[in-house]
């Protein structure tokens, strides 16, 4: 999807029975998968019957004459195996997406369970593991896959060489855990996992507070300047100075702010409980504090907040078989150039690609995207 939104011509090859996620929730009232249509926007699709031997050469031709790039998350049948494809197309770029690097399967939620992160998620008094509802490793792997393909294309342009890349969900998860210092932390401290801290931001000041009108807000102060601005804005400098004196911990150190997070909460919470969200917004915005009110998804998409205000990446688009819905294009913007517009998803074709004179490819290109 990322490559398609960048302007590449992407052809999604589906089995004859249809894609396995073609009916995945959420569904429209007509029964169409909003999940499938959103993730396949700007692509084209072709349905292929690999049990038909006559289709094997046609598949090689499709690949050879349409960019010579193959991204696959499933093993290919022997007649068009990657080894044979590389023999036929010497500069072929192949990206194999895997669950585990040994080729065994995994999905985002099983990878989450393996990482240990769910043990550190949720309320501090919680006992059961809590998965992130956002498919973190799918998203990270998808973006890294796009980067890998672009790097391989650039190398092929310079050297003429193809590439065979394997990218596993578990490797992406492990790399991220090391990159965030979590693996080193466990190795050096002897801890089995990181403790649960609820909505507190680990290692710095970040807390949620309840307001007088029943909302909750999240406030973060990472730098010393942000912390000082927050303390002065809500008028708790004297109380926090006493806390620092009592404990011997200077609160201009973000690690000390995290250690004293509960004491700081007790000092700051009354200021929030005494005010409505609008009053809190006026003070914190004027002071340049990092904060936000917790919103529902519906509010986030409709409320003229910073989340949606001023953005132009969302368009209302008609996908085949789906009423017009908000659809996001690529998040990046090219300064001084037109925004890269998106396009609808293709038809969820189910007919064989090789039955008479039927059109093999369902196009999703409406002519608005640059190539």
Image (cartoon, rainbow, N blue to C red):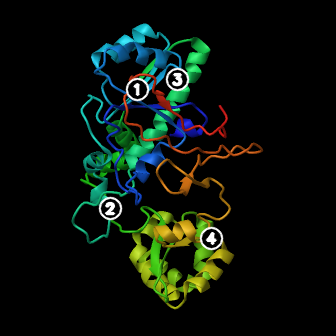
Marks 4 and 2: in contact by CB < 8 Å?
no
**Tag 4 or tag 3, which sits nearer the N-term?**
3
Q: What element carries label 2?
A: loop
Residue indicated by mark 1: 353
**Tag 1 or tag 4, which sits nearer the N-term?**
4
CA distance for labels 4 and 1 = 46 Å
CA distance for labels 2 and 1 = 46 Å
Q: Is residue 278 left or right of residue 337?
A: left
Residue 216, how many percent across, how many down? 46, 78
Name which quarter of the figure residue 279 lies in. bottom right
Name which quarter of the figure residue 125 lies in. bottom left
**Tag 1 or tag 2, which sits nearer the N-term?**
2
Q: Residue at x 47, y 42 (%)?
A: 40
Marks 4 and 3: in contact by CB < 8 Å?
no
Residue indicated by mark 3: 152
Marks 1 and 2: in contact by CB < 8 Å?
no
Residue indicated by mark 2: 121
Residue 32, how many percent across, how many down? 40, 52
Looking at the image, is mark 1 or mark 3 nearer the viewer?
Answer: 1
Residue indicated by mark 4: 304
Q: Residue furthest right?
A: 336
Quadrant where the image shows the C terminus: top right
Task: Note whether 20 is above or below 120 in the view shown.
Answer: above
Residue 72, how many percent across, how many down? 38, 29
């Amino acid at each position: 999807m990322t490559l398609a939104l960048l302007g590449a011509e992407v052809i999604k090859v589906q089995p004859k029975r249809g894609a396995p996620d073609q009916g995945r929730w959420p569904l429209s009232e007509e029964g169409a998968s909003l999940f499938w249509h959103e993730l396949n926007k700007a692509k084209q699709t072709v349905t292929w019957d690999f049990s038909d031997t006559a289709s094997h050469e046609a598949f090689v031709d499709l690949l050879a004459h349409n960019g010579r790039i193959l991204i696959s998350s499933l093993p290919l049948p022997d007649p068009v195996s990657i080894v044979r494809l590389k023999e036929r197309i010497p500069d072929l770029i192949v990206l194999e997406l895997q669950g585990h690097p040994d080729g065994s399967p995994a999905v985002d939620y099983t990878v989450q369970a393996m990482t240990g992160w769910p043990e550190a998620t949720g309320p501090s008094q919680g006992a059961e593991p809590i998965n992130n509802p956002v498919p973190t490793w799918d998203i990270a792997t998808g973006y890294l896959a796009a980067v890998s393909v672009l790097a391989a294309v650039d190398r092929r342009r310079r050297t003429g060489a193809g590439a065979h890349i394997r990218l596993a969900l578990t490797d992406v998860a492990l790399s991220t855990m090391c990159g965030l210092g979590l693996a080193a932390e466990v190795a050096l401290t002897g801890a089995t996992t990181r403790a649960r801290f609820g909505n507190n931001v680990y290692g710095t000041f970040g807390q949620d507070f309840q307001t007088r009108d029943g909302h909750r807000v999240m406030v973060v102060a990472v730098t010393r300047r942000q912390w000082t601005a927050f303390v002065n804005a809500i008028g708790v400098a004297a109380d926090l100075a006493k806390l620092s004196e009592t404990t011997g911990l200077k609160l201009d150190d973000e690690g000390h702010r995290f250690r004293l997070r509960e004491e700081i909460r007790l000092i700051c919470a009354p200021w929030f409980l005494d005010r409505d969200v609008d009053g809190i917004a006026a003070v914190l915005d004027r002071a340049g504090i990092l904060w936000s009110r917790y919103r529902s998804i519906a509010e986030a998409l409709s409320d003229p907040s910073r989340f949606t205000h001023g953005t132009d990446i969302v368009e209302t688009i008609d996908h085949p078989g789906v009423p017009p819905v908000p659809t996001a294009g690529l998040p990046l913007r090219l300064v001084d150039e037109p925004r890269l517009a998106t396009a609808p998803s293709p038809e969820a074709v189910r007919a064989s690609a090789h039955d008479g004179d039927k059109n093999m490819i369902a196009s999703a290109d409406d002519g608005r995207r640059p190539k």
